[in-house]
Image (cartoon, helix red, strand yellow):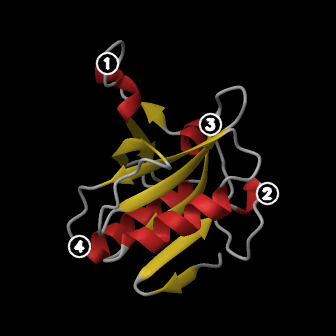
Amino acid sequence: MLAHTTSGWSIFINAESGLRSTIEAGVSKDRASLEGEALAALADEITEERFRSWRGISGRRYIFSVYDSHNCPAYCEAVLIAVAIDKCGAKRAVAFAETGTFPEPVLSQLTRSCVGGAVKLEFHMHLLANTAAERNSILEDLKRAA
C-alpha cells in the first residue's frame, strides 16, 4: 500500500476505484466494508442520510458524518473516507485520509483525485478520535477491511 504524506497528512486511495493516481489502498472484500452502513437507529428520520457507519477488519464500528464534497467543513485531525456514488446510487470507499492540522489541502486533493467515474463524491468524517495514534489505528483498521 502506497501513501502520499506531506505536512502531517496522508491519503490512501483505493486501487480498485480506477482513479488516476500514484496513491493506492485496499481492495474491497464485502458490500458492508465497501459501502458502509446506514444507522438503524436513524431509519426513517430526517437525519438518516447525514450519518453512516464503517466497520474495520477488527469488527469495530465507527460512526461518520456525511457531507457533500463541495460543502464539507474543514475539520482538523479527523478521519476521512472519500466515497464515490455511481449512477445507480451505489456507494464505494475510494480513499482514506487523516486530515491533520491543515485539512484544506487534504480536502482539495481528494476532491480533485477521487471524482473518477462517480456521479457524486461524499466525504465521510469521523470526529471522535482524540489522538493521532487513535486516528492512525482507525485508518489502518478501515483500510484493512476495505
The amino acid marked with disc number 4 is Thr
The amino acid marked with disc number 2 is Gly
Residue at image x 36%, y 28%?
39
Separation of marks 2 and 1 at Cα, in angstroms: 34 Å
Residue to which mark 3 is pinned? 31
> Toward which corner of the image does residue 12 lie, by quadrant?
bottom right
How many numbered tags mark residues here? Answer: 4
Question: Which of pointers 3 and 2 lies earlier in the amino acid sequence?
Answer: 2
Residue at image x 35%, y 48%?
62
Q: In the drawing, does residue 49 fall left or right of residue 117?
A: left
Q: In the drawing, does residue 127 fall left or right of residue 16?
A: left
Q: In which quarter of the image is the N terminus?
A: bottom right
Residue to which mark 4 is pinned? 131
Q: Is disc 2 placed on a helix, strand or loop?
A: loop
Residue at image x 30%, y 69%?
77
Residue to which mark 2 is pinned? 18
Please tell me whether residue 134 is drawn above or below residue 65 in the rendered image: below
Residue 80: x %, y % from top left: 43, 58
Q: Which residue lies furthest to the top in this view?
A: 44
The amino acid marked with disc number 1 is Ile
Residue 46: give its label: 1
Question: Which of pointers 2 and 4 lies earlier in the amino acid sequence?
Answer: 2
